[in-house]
Image: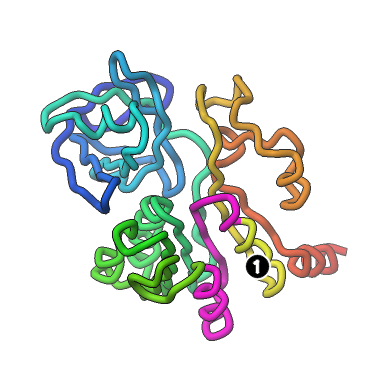
């Protein structure tokens, strides 16, 4: 199958499965999504299991990286090559590359969509630095792949089993001080994203952050993925911001950049 119709569910055959870390697998399918962008997601359905959202690891060929931590994700990961998955999408707003010097920050399996983004940036001839954080070395993903395609990769683990010991935000700050990026792009736990936003505010860096939510419909109807009101207020997003439709990627302008824009427009 060549491509997926965004509004209709279509069947794809599983071509191969690659284990990425202790609990995560990349599923390569027999098609592509030529109009997709990094940071978007698809809804994946398996009979008797249900439907789940997964971000894209690659659009051409089509690949999803799945952390097998619950019954539905384990059932999807257990599908043998040649088995069938049903997809609809892509949905949501993805990342948009801005500038020529990019910093990508991934926490845990948040590295998957950023690998897709890094490939696009490097294909343009841009400069790409990637900071990856995880609990331990066994939880890291795509470190070597990112280095192979030409990105500079920096690693932090909570237990110090690989790279710098501690939070990935400390590594990010060090890189900002040495190589301030035009834009920062991130995917991972909400706590990490909020800490990164604080850094972006302090150093006047535009951020594109991908948020998680309980996505059920994928089209903004059910409201189950509405971002917490207090987070919206801190980020400057409108109340009722939906991860599935308004995001998952939010572009955030630091206060100084907003002020500069208003001055120029005035």
Report if residue 121 is visible in the image.
yes
Which region shows up in magenta? 169-193
Q: Is residue 28 left or right of residue 204?
A: left
* Quarter of the image with the N terminus in it: top left
Identify the residue shown where x is 51% and y is 37%. Answer: 92
Q: Position of residue 101 (x, y in %)?
A: 49, 73
- Please rate how many residues cluster around mark 1, counting C-alpha atoms within 10 Å: few if below 14, some from 14 to 19, many from 20: many
Q: Quadrant of residue 124?
A: bottom left
Query: Which residue is disc 1 drawn over?
Result: 200
Of residue 85 and residue 119, the one placed in the foreground of this image is 85
Q: Position of residue 180 (x, y in %)?
A: 57, 79
Identify the residue shown where x is 29% and y is 20%. Answer: 46
- Farthest-out residue, bottom: 178
Q: Position of residue 240 (x, y in %)?
A: 72, 33
Above or below 258: residue 230 = above
- Farthest-out residue, right: 266
- Farthest-out residue, front: 159
Of residue 153 and residue 164, the one placed in the foreground of this image is 164
Assess whether residue 180 is covered by the magenta stretch.
yes
Assess whether residue 86 is covered by the magenta stretch.
no
Q: Is residue 161 left or right of residue 18?
A: right
Identify the residue shown where x is 41% and y is 54%. Answer: 108
Of residue 259 and residue 64, the one placed in the foreground of this image is 64
Q: Is residue 27 left or right of residue 94?
A: left
Q: Is residue 2 left or right of residue 125?
A: left
Element carrying mark 1? helix
* Quarter of the image with the C terminus in it: bottom right
Q: Quadrant of residue 207?
A: bottom right
Q: Position of residue 60 (x, y in %)?
A: 26, 45
């Amino acid at each position: 199958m060549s491509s997926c119709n965004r509004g209709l569910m279509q069947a794809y055959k599983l071509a191969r499965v690659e284990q990425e870390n202790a609990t995560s697998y990349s599923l390569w399918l027999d098609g592509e999504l030529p109009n997709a962008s990094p940071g978007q997601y698809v809804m994946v359905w398996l009979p008797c299991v249900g439907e789940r959202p997964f971000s894209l690891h690659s659009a051409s060929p089509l690949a999803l990286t799945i952390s097998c931590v619950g019954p539905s994700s384990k059932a999807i990961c257990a599908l043998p090559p040649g088995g069938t998955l049903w997809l609809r999408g892509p949905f949501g707003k993805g990342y948009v590359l801005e500038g020529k010097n990019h910093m990508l920050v991934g926490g845990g399996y948040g590295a998957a969509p950023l690998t897709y983004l890094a490939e696009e940036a490097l294909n343009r001839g841009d400069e790409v630095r990637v900071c990856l954080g995880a609990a331990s070395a066994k939880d890291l993903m795509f470190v070597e792949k990112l280095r192979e395609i030409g990105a500079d990769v920096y690693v932090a683990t909570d237990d110090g089993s690989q790279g710098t010991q501690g939070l990935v935000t400390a590594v990010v700050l060090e890189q900002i001080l040495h190589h301030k990026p035009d834009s920062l792009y991130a995917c991972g736990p909400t706590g990490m994203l909020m800490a990164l936003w604080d850094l972006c505010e302090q150093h006047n860096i535009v951020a594109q952050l991908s948020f998680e939510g309980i996505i059920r419909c994928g089209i903004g109807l059910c409201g189950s993925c509405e971002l917490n009101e207090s987070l919206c207020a801190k980020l400057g997003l409108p109340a009722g911001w939906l991860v599935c439709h308004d995001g998952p990627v939010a572009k955030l302008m630091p206060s100084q950049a907003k002020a500069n824009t208003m001055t120029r427009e005035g």
